[in-house]
Image (cartoon, grey):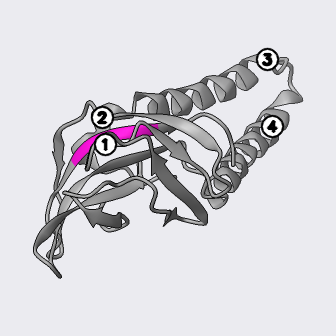
Amino acid sequence: MIPFSHHHHHHHHHHSNDYYNHQNILFYLFQSVPTNHTSTTTIMQFSIGSLAFLGIAAFTGFANAQAQAVAFGQQLQNDDQTNHWVAWVEGQHACPGMQVLDVLTKSPCDRAFNLGEVMYTFTGCSGDNGPPTAILDSGGLQVGGCSANANNKINCHDGLHDIIKHGVCTIVTGA
């Protein structure tokens, strides 16, 4: 459902847990139907219905474009050959898909950027160009905190420079 980039899959244990939880739910449904002669068709309809429901639930969550986490880092931009701050939805392709913010020597904070339909702003940067410590929604409400403990390279293609990931802002409340 969500395209993962294989270059940073080790950060996404929570996604795979969700997947296994769904599997367990379906398995449980199979187990819980009484095993008499009339139950074969019931099992089929029941599981297909559940699968459809899970698919719809996942899709509507995705359509709202409400990121669960926003990753940030730096990337050399072709137009000015300078490193810029970039942000993207954690767990989706960082490139293409990243939003380019100000040059790396300036603060990534206090500049609104769009990810999907949602507008975010980094806040709480220290000094001239420190990493963000929190993230705001379009109404200026703090919707999550940020940690800058990553330093891994994400491989980009099609003439885009690689991204160095610096951290993630985890969103705790819905916008």
Sequence-first disc among 3 and 1: 3
Sequence-first disc among 4 and 2: 4
Amino acid type of the residue that numbered disc 2 sits on in the rendered structure: Ala
Q: Secondary structure at mark 2?
A: loop
Residue 131: image tag: 1
Q: Does residue 89 appear left or right of residue 78 in this picture? A: right
The residues bearing labels 1 and 4 have C-alpha atoms spaced at a distance of 49 Å
In this rendering, the label closer to the viewer, 3 or 1: 1
Q: Which residue is mark 4?
A: 46
Is residue 39 placed above or below 79 in the rendered structure? above
Residue 171 highlighted magenta (yes or no): no
* Residue 101 in which image quadrant: bottom left
The residues bearing labels 4 and 2 have C-alpha atoms spaced at a distance of 45 Å
The residues bearing labels 3 and 1 have C-alpha atoms spaced at a distance of 50 Å
Q: Secondary structure at mark 3?
A: helix
Sequence-first disc among 2 and 3: 3
Q: Which residue is painted at 38% across and 39% down in the image?
A: 168
Q: Secondary structure at mark 1?
A: loop
Mark 4 touches mark 2? (CB < 8 Å):
no
Residue 91, percent across and down?
Answer: 41, 46
Q: Which residue is mark 3?
A: 32
Using a 10 Å C-alpha cutoff, classify the residue at mark 4 as few (fewer than 14 neighbours), some (14 to 19) or many (20 or more): some
Sequence-first disc among 1 and 4: 4
The residues bearing labels 2 and 3 have C-alpha atoms spaced at a distance of 45 Å
Mark 1 touches mark 2? (CB < 8 Å):
yes
Q: Does residue 142 appear left or right of residue 41 in this picture? A: left
Q: Magenta residues: mostly which secondary structure?
A: strand
The answer to whether one can see residue 153 in this image is yes
Q: Secondary structure at mark 4?
A: helix
